[in-house]
Image: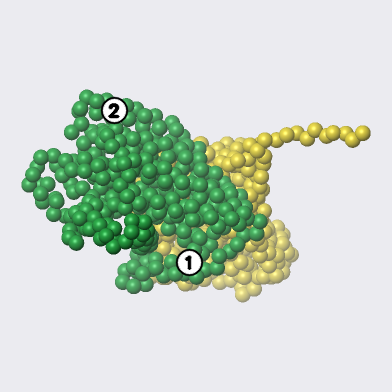
Chain colours: A yellow, B green
Amino acid sequence: MKEIINLPVRSIEEEEYHINMGPQHPSTHGVLRLVVTLQGETVMKVQPHCGYIHRGIEKMCEKDTYQQIIHLTDRMDYLSAHINNHAVCLLVEGALEVEVPERVKYIRTIVDELNRIASHQLWWCSFGMDLGGLTCFFYGLRDREHILDIFEESFGSRLLHSYYAPGGLMQDIHPNFQKRTKDFIKYFRKKIKDYDNILSGNVIFENRSQGIGVMSKEEAINYGVCGPSGRASGWECDIRKKYPYAMYDKVDFREVLSDKGDTYARYMVRIDEMRESMKIIEQLIDNIPEGDYSVKMKPIIKLPPGEYYQRVESARGELGIYCISDGNKTPVRMKFRTPSFVNLGVLDKLSRNMKIADLVAIGASLDLVIPDIDR
Amino acid sequence: MAFNIYDFTSFTQSIDEALYEWLPPFWALIVEMTIIGLVFLIGYAIIGLFLVYAERKVCAFMQNRVGPNRVGPYGIFQTIADFIKLLMKELVYIKNSDKLLFNIAPFIVIIASFMAIAAIPFAKGLHAIDFDIGIMYVIAVTSLGVVGVLLAGWSSNNKYSLIGAMRSGAQIISYELSVGLSLLTIIVLAGTMQFSEVVELQSSGWFIFKGHIPACIAFVIFLIASTAETNRGPFDLAEAESELTAGFHTEYSGIKFAFFFLAEYMNMFIVASIAATVFLGGWMPFHIGSWEGFNYVMDFIPPLFWYFGKTAFIIWLMMWFKWTFPRLRIDQLLNLEWKYLLPINLVNILIMAFIVLMGWHF
């Protein structure tokens, strides 16, 4: 006799289905693919699939000299290219025990902070756009243009600068650099109020972001969520404070923290961080000491055999470089601990049982840069 | 045939009489319908193209941009160029889609908006058909559009489209209530649903001023609800570009996409003209009670100017919302309707009925 199997009857409301968010999707900001399991409009699970923009940067590093590696790191997190370069420079200088001139340290700190502001501005643009406020995009880009103009004048390019070199800088800053930077700070102090006016105080925006994607401090530590996203959960993870490099131990700035851990907190931390960055620049810009912009390095840099680790605070969090050298001109292994990759891990945890619109908001608030995830 | 810019009644009537003199009644009616249809078709295209251009310029103004400025002086031919481009684009047919519904959907959307124009009075006597239940007709016809949106989402065989369609179904059906109830508030005040009478009654003052606070509340609710009903501004959840790529019209290309696009702008125009007609007096000039001199001066401005001016003002308000506010989430959207707008609206109608009963209105 044929046995009758009673399959569990599931109503349409209980039925789960998948949608592919990306690789081509307006709010993944690149070629990230999220396979989202939905029940109605509620997100049940998010599975990120990386690799659509994998270029093998870590492997390419193994055949490149250290000067060449700098140019590759630009392409990881293209929005904080200077800070990525800084990490490689610090690694090489630390391994060779080279002391760079004061002038270099000052300039590096200022340029890093300018880069951080530019990165946060672009994040603000896209965050507003993901929530449907299209005007934010143009407000942010308008102000970012001023920074890119400063960069273009001094370093010759707007996005991928490769300005730092082991031992110092590629060339000295442009004579206009100080004046233009000061003008920008003056300008942006006024314009940042617009940011608050158009988004921060808006009822719809507050409803969309407050209490959405709450991440506790323990979760942030467990998932290794660093940078502004981690600090929004109250985790003091600023590398600039914990392991100071360049001029960060000599300038006065506040590590912006929040204990809410929701999307709104991540938003406010970044907005405040832009203000702190301006404060750092203001302290340094007038006192850049005279001197060389670089120390004399050998044309072919060979690191002594051993393992090295160097971390810097990029605009998205801790960027770590782990390097094994066998004494040759190229490293045996380069490993980048990129912040976006680590922060992506928590996306599934945060967006469960939220709506699709919340998933977009949470993803935007983690500030993911896709080439930084895939490398 | 007396052509008078202040009163089109004699002009339209003389055309009507002439046609009925020359032709048998049946053919006269057919010719009349054809003429009106053609006029509306041309008007539809011109208004649609103008609104697309206006939106681009307004949003450019809000976003520190220049907007279209290359094709023709100030870029006024840009939308026409875009429209020609859309006409010439390939229509992509989707495998496994429901062909019939997929093809019908854009037409339903555009027909719904087309039918609504018929009842709108543009000026005195410039009125395709003057129903005695004009307001109800417009509410009924504009809500047909949601069928097209639902079908478009359903037949595309795309999950993004389906989510968008379901969202817009929930959204439009809910906000339909607020639109209806806020108009009902004014019907209570006016005592008629005929558009021409509604406008005539406002000759001593617009309803938004005559109806005290309830009329103002109804106006604000109507603005919010009608913005939601046209899938615009902070309520564009059915499209939700950053979440659902383009929502219900993700899979449409070429001229079919243009239909949805045009219908959105026409719906905005219709909603704005209803708001202008019902709350701001339509083509009626700005009159203050018994100030004869003031009213006399105001009467010199032609009614068409008043009508389009008020409509443009409300369209500008809606564009302002769209380019300023972030988008709501679907549950917040429905909360706003069912927990706030609807109860406020119901109380508002009661207050209005009480005011009319006591004769406290102007």
Number of marks drawn? 2
Looking at the image, the residue that sits furthest to the bottom is: A299
User: Is label 1 on the same chain as label 2?
Assistant: yes
Q: Residue at x 29, y 44 (%)?
A: B195
* Label 2 packing within 10 angstroms: few (<14), some (14-19), many (20+): some
The residue wearing badge 2 is B353
Amino acid, disc 2: Ala
The residue wearing badge 1 is B86
Amino acid, disc 1: Leu
Tag 2, which secondary structure? helix
* Label 1 packing within 10 angstroms: few (<14), some (14-19), many (20+): some
Tag 1, which secondary structure? helix
Horizontal arrangement in the rendering, residue B273 relative to residue A276 (left or right): left
Residue B272 seen in the figure: no
Question: As rendered, which of B7 and A104 lies closer to the eye?
Answer: B7
Viewport quadrant of the N terminus of chain B: bottom left
Question: As rendered, which of B198 and A143 lies closer to the eye?
Answer: B198
